[in-house]
Every structure is written in C-alpha cells, then in structure tokens.
Amino acid sequence: MKKVVALIISVAMVILAFAGCSNKTNDVKDTAATQTQVEKALALINTFATGDTETAKGLLAEGYIQHNLAYGTGRDAFIGSVEYLASAPEKTTVKNIRAFEDGDKVFLQTVYNFAGAGEQVAFDIFRFDDEGLIAEHWDNLANIADPNPSGHTQIDGTMEVTDLDKTEENRELVNNFLHDVMMNEAPEKTADYFDGDNYIQHNTGIADGLSGLGAALEELGKQGIQMIYDENHQILAQGNFVLAVSEGSFGGVPTAYYDLWRIENGKIAEHWDIMETIAEKDTWQNQNGKF
C-alpha cells in the first residue's frame, strides 16, 4: 500500500510540474499578445539579464535568423545563449537607451555587459513575422569609450522622438546623404545637408560640427586611412531619427557601419554610430551573413 501511495504522489507531482510549465508558457504567450513590438524586443534582450528562457521562447519564431556572426542561428541557439549567461559567475546587465519602430522592425540602442566582460554599446534590429514573433536579428557592437573631443559619449544626447509625419521625408534625406556624401557620388553637396556648423557628434574620435568631421577625415587621409561606404543595406526611420546600415571598409578592412542620425528642420543635426569589423568567414557561427 505504501508503494502505491508513493507512486500516486510521484505521478501527481509530475502532473503538477507539467501543468506549471504549461501555465507559464501560456502566461508568456498571453503577455506577448498584448505587447507592442518595441516592448517585445525589450523583453527579449532583457532575458540576457534575467535568464528567463520561457520568455525568450515565447517571443522568438522557431526559424529565428541570426546575423550576429559570433552566434548560431535559430531559436534554440538564442535560448542556449540565455542559459549560458544565466550560469555565468557574474550577472549580465542590459540598459536600453533608445528604442524605435519602423513597420515590421524595431531598432534599439543599448548598453550591455555580458557576464562581466565589459560594457558595450550596441545597435540591434529585430524583424517581426506575421504572427508577431521575432524572426530575424542584425546588430553592431563596440566597447564603451571615453567622451569624444567635444565631450559627448556614444549614448548621450537627444532622446525625444518627434516629427512622425516627416518619417519618410527624413528617410529620403538620409538615403540621399549616403549616396551623395558617404559614397562620394556628389561630395560638393555636403554642406547642403547641414545647418552651417551646427552638428552634434557622438563618434568617439570626432568633434562637433561639419568642421570637426572635415578635420577628422583630413587626419585619416594623412595616415593613409580611407573610410569607404560601398553599399547601404537598410534605412530605418521613425520621425526625426534614421538608422542606416551600410557595408564598406575602414583602412582596407571590411566594415559594417551603423549610423543613427537625428534630423531637424530638414538638416542633419546629430549623429551616433558604431563601426564593427566584419569577421573572417571561417570564424562565422552561422552562414546568414552580416547583412
């Protein structure tokens, strides 16, 4: 009789355990159903800090496509990363700075410290599928650096999103700027994109103003270093903020450029960026490519 009772108790405990997991999964799905895309993206990156694999699983499409070349692709690979960070001796921290939405994509600027490895600033882009699940991810990361010559950091500056009615106009402005200036198709138009020398710069090595940009490029030229933009892959926009994802080279090394510009009165007023060297193909952990 004691063995029978013990067996019944064991079976009951298993059933309750499965029920608890099922309820948690359902709770995650119910919560996700009421969240905005931005809220879902923020909830996903926060799982790096919380270790909440159930939330990650509920937010990700099974065929999740990863473009960070240091990680495997697919939902299970992402969940594995969350589990790994949760097991690390030092806790991961996540601090979102800015968040934007453009159609089926969310783009974020965030400071991470993965398992105590040191603070990094990142731009993340997440694409959502028709079911509202996160289906694809791109990013660029760089170590946090000291303030630039004008005293600005990689993350400070204007926060407010305005001019939502000018989103497409501002997207087109940045598209033209990329071709005319960054891709050197019509460099004589450079000054047309700025309000005189009024330009706030967050690049770690460049001072404010169009003059600061010119001086930095001149110095690079003296060192024989070329900053080349060959192709733009994405231009995402919400109101007065526009993020461009471009491919090129820096000093002859293949480079991914993520540039966030703030537009004011039809002129480029402020700039944040992350440059990241594109890893050698034989080191890639997925074959989806950087872009």
Image (cartoon, helix red, strand yellow):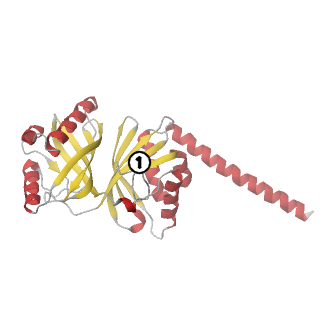
**What residue is shown with label 1?**
137
The spot of residue 252 in percent (x, y) is 20, 59
The spot of residue 224 in percent (x, y) is 11, 61
The spot of residue 161 in percent (x, y) is 28, 39
Q: Tell me the residue at 61%/47% (across/down).
A: 25
Number of numbered tags placed on the structure image: 1
In the image, taking residue 270 as reference, residue 189 lies left or right, namely left
Q: 274 or 255, which is in the foreground?
A: 255
Q: Tell me the residue at 17%/44% (across/down).
A: 183
Task: Classify mark 1: residues with Cα within 10 Å, few (<14), some (14-19) or many (20+).
Answer: many
In the image, taking residue 116 as reference, residue 273 lies left or right, namely left
In the image, taking residue 86 as reference, residue 203 lies left or right, namely left
The spot of residue 108 in percent (x, y) is 35, 47
Q: Label 1's element?
A: strand
| Quadrant in the rendering for residue 150 | bottom left
Instruction: Judge whether residue 130 can be spotted in this image.
Output: yes
Residue situated furthest right in the rendering:
1
Instruction: Judge whether residue 195 can be spotted in this image.
Output: no
Q: 60 or 69, which is in the foreground?
A: 69
Q: What residue type is labelled 1?
A: His
Q: 103 or 195, which is in the foreground?
A: 103
| Quadrant in the rendering for residue 121 | bottom left
In the image, taking residue 192 as reference, residue 27 lies left or right, namely right
Q: Tell me the residue at 45%/65% (across/down).
A: 91
Q: Quadrant of the N terminus?
A: bottom right
Q: Tell me the residue at 48%/59% (across/down).
A: 81
Residue situated furthest bottom in the rendering:
89
Residue situated furthest top in the rendering:
165
